[in-house]
Amino acid sequence: MFRLQAQHACLAWAFEAIRGRPGIVAELGLGHGRTYDHLRNLLPDREIYVFDRANEAYPDCQPPEQYLVIGDVKDTVPALYGKLGGKVVLTNTDLGTFDASLNPVIAAMVSHIVPPLMAPGGIIMSDLELDLPDYERVALPPGAPADAYRLYRKPI
Ligand SMILES: C[S@@+](CC[C@H](N)C(=O)[O-])C[C@H]1O[C@@H](n2cnc3c(N)ncnc32)[C@H](O)[C@@H]1O
């Protein structure tokens, strides 16, 4: 619950940051679909592409088939650069695991595959610390404890 509150505080900030900027939203890690459900409720006019290895979302949190991309993101995200490249204004990535030894590998992969998606001024919100030297690191909003999430903004 604590983590969900932190995530919602960061997303609320991100929604303001992208207001007035046209573009697509990407969710890496559908999981049970709770975050996706939050995104679609608060961003009803955005196209939201959702990526996961498998669809294990609750029945009432299902993305439309044409926006759900099943497979390993290291393959499925680059496969969509032609369609989505440079057009994403918000990426939320939530791929970390409880096996801490794997998280640096996941973070390096995310740092590599996500930037080509991003539009100028776009926001990346991540559960893991990313290596994005060309991005501005944004301080977390009030209500989000340090280390819960990370926010990065691509310069315009
Ligand atoms: C912590 S859960 C996401 C929780 C989700 N935000 C929610 O609201 O329920 C992480 C998800 O990332 C997916 N995942 C992890 N690594 C992945 C990868 N390399 N490619 C695709 N999906 C991956 C897992 O299958 C899992 O469903």
Image: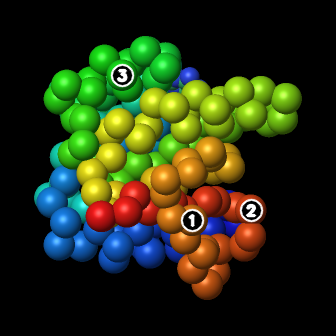
Q: Residues within 10 Å of mark 2 (few under 14, many from 20)?
A: few
In percent of the image, x 46 and y 23: which residue is there? 73
- Please state if 35 lies on the left or on the right of 131 as rendered: left
Mark 3 vs 2, N-terminal side: 3
Mark carried by residue 110: none
| Residue on which the image places disc 3 | 78
Tag 2: residue type?
Answer: Asp
Question: What residue is pinned by disc 2?
Answer: 147
Q: Quadrant of the N terminus?
A: bottom right
**Mark 3 belongs to which amino acid?**
Pro
Quick one: 133 or 70, which is closer to the camera? 133
Determine the image quadrant of residue 151: bottom right
Residue plotted at (57% across, 43% down): 94
Q: How many marks?
A: 3
Residue 37: x and y in percent read: 38, 51
* Mark toward the viewer: 3 or 2: 3
Q: Do the residues labelled 3 and 1 touch (CB within 8 Å)?
A: no
